[in-house]
Image: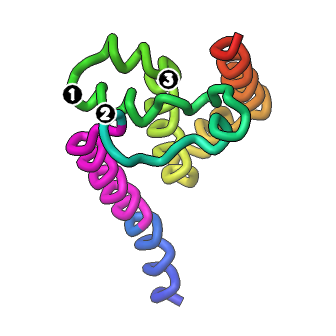
Amino acid sequence: MKTGHRFRRSAPIAVVAAVAVAIVVLCWYYYSHDPSSGPSLKCTFKVLTGYDCPGCGSQRAFHALLHGRFALAWSYNPMVFFAVPAAVYYLIIESGRRRWPRLHAASVNPFIISAILIAITAFWIGRNI
C-alpha cells in the first residue's frame, strides 16, 4: 500500500518536471530560431480561410518577447501577453489541485472559463474586422 502512495506522490513531480523541461526547450527554440525568417509551422486556419485565428502571430510574438521587443510582440499578437501568464497560472493551479482545492474550484468555475472563451472569441472576431 505504501508503494502506491509513493507512486502517486511522485507522479505530479514527474509531470511538473516534464512540463518544465518542455518549457525550457520551447523557450530555447523560439529564442534561437526566428519564425519570420525560416521554416515554421503555418496556421492551418489561415491557410484554408485567409483569416487570422486567435493564435496567428504568436510564434513571432513569443520570439520577440524572448528578445525583449515588447512593442513588436504586441504588434504580432497581443493575446500572447495574456495567454502565456494564464497558461502558466492554470498549469500551477492544476498541479496543485489537491493542495489548493478552493482556488482550483474557483479557477475552473464555468463562469470564468466562459469569460475566457468569450474574450478569445471577441479577439478573434476583432482582429479580422
Q: How many numbered discs? A: 3
Pointers 3 and 2 in contact (CB under 8 A)?
no
Going by the image, does 126 lie left or right of 25? right
Q: Secondary structure at mark 3?
A: helix
Amino acid type indicated by mark 1: His
Is 109 located above or below residue 96 in the figure? above
Q: Residues within 10 Å of mark 2 (few under 14, many from 20)?
A: many
Amino acid type indicated by mark 3: Phe
Q: Indicate which disc, 1 or 3, sits on the residue closer to the N terminus.
A: 1
Q: Which mark is residue 45?
A: none
Quadrant position of the N terminus in the picture: bottom right
Quadrant position of the C terminus in the picture: top right
User: Residue 33 at x, y = what percent?
Assistant: 26, 44
User: Residue 53 at x, y = what percent?
Assistant: 64, 30
Q: Indicate which disc, 3 or 2, sits on the residue closer to the N terminus.
A: 2
Reading the image, the residue beneath label 1 is: 67
Reading the image, the residue beneath label 3 is: 82
Q: Secondary structure at mark 1?
A: loop
Q: Secondary structure at mark 2?
A: helix
